[in-house]
Amino acid sequence: MRLALAEARKGLGRTSPNPPVGAVLVRDGRMLSTGYHEQAGGPHAEVRALRDGKARGMDLAGATMYVTLEPCSTTGRTPPCVEALIEAGLRRVVVGSTDPNPRHAGNGLEVLRRAGLEVESGVLAPACDDLIRFFRKHILTGRPFVVAKTGMTLDGRITPAPGGSRWITGEAARLDVQRLRGEVDAILVGGETVRKDNPRLTLRGAEALRRTQPMRVVVTRSGELPADAILFTDEHRERTRVFHVEHLEPVLDALGAEGVCSVLLECGGRLSGEAFTRRLVDEVVFYVAPVIGGGPERAVAGEGFRARLSAPEIVWFGADLRYRATVDYPGEAS
């Protein structure tokens, strides 16, 4: 299953509104083939693994498939994967996550069992569930999964001190931000960020070659935005959306209705604080530099809200660290 997870991660950022999925075919302890879901509308991971095995001249009858997500049992853009698995003559299917869609959950497993295949589910389920967290949130609520990202000093400042470097974190951490951007459907900022920083919000380097540019979303209360801002004039200007609203909920509703499964907040402290106050943030990714003291702007502005971070993951990029964690709110199940 760990190999299937590695396969699935190859599709991160490219499969929306479908989830990333990986599959591995094994017989007698020998790996026969692999596959992953590369893009929405294309073959699912299971079918790609079957095709890869056949292309290699492998006899797939009696093999075991490890797949990170329950095989689909309904016809969408592609035929049901369960039919392909049954026709291939597999003996056993090992699944990580059950389909989070209440209308489909467990159906694929039951179809396989009725056809005589041995089915095991829940293998490495936490890792497999984490892989599809964007998809799960969108399926269950209609809204995208919201990740709040920022770079900050140790005392929580997101603007550098006057006269210092424009960057708070180092180059390695900034490269990791490109990877993070490459996994989401949209990047959201406030109008103040556009007016003050004139950001590009683009994928650069290797990430720019993997997928199309994420949607760039600007949320503004005043509606006063510079017409010559990069977001409105560069080669990706058709990927920029502006919402003239008071709060974030209608923005997330509209994006979710368009099939956007994940949003990366790269906004200033005021809009970030509002997102936490209104319990809209699902995950944080904070890049923290070994610096004390910066400009006046806090990473999360405002008062009176409370959120607890759980399941933290800490990764070092030189002297900087990336702190990723799930956001839990009082009164909600963690």
Image (cartoon, rainbow, N blue to C red):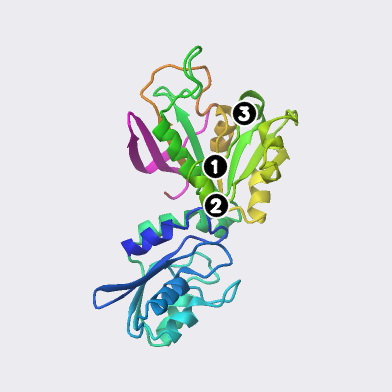
Q: Residue furthest top?
A: 163
Do tag 1 and tag 2 residues touch (Cβ < 8 Å)?
yes
Number of labels in the image equals 3
Disc marking residue 211:
2
Q: Which residue is mark 1?
A: 203
Q: Which residues are magenta?
A: 304-333
Which sits earlier in the primary sequence, circle 1 or circle 2?
Answer: 1
Q: Residue at x 34, y 39 (%)?
A: 314
Do tag 1 and tag 3 residues touch (Cβ < 8 Å)?
no
Whole-angstrom CA distance, mark 1 to mark 2, is 9 Å
Query: Which amino acid type is shown beneath numbered disc 1?
Result: Leu
User: Left or right: 278 with respect to 61?
Assistant: right
In the foreground, 261 or 273: 261
Q: Residue at x 57, y 63 (%)?
A: 40
Q: Which residue is mark 3?
A: 193
Seen in the picture, residue 100 relative to 49 is either above or below; the reply is above
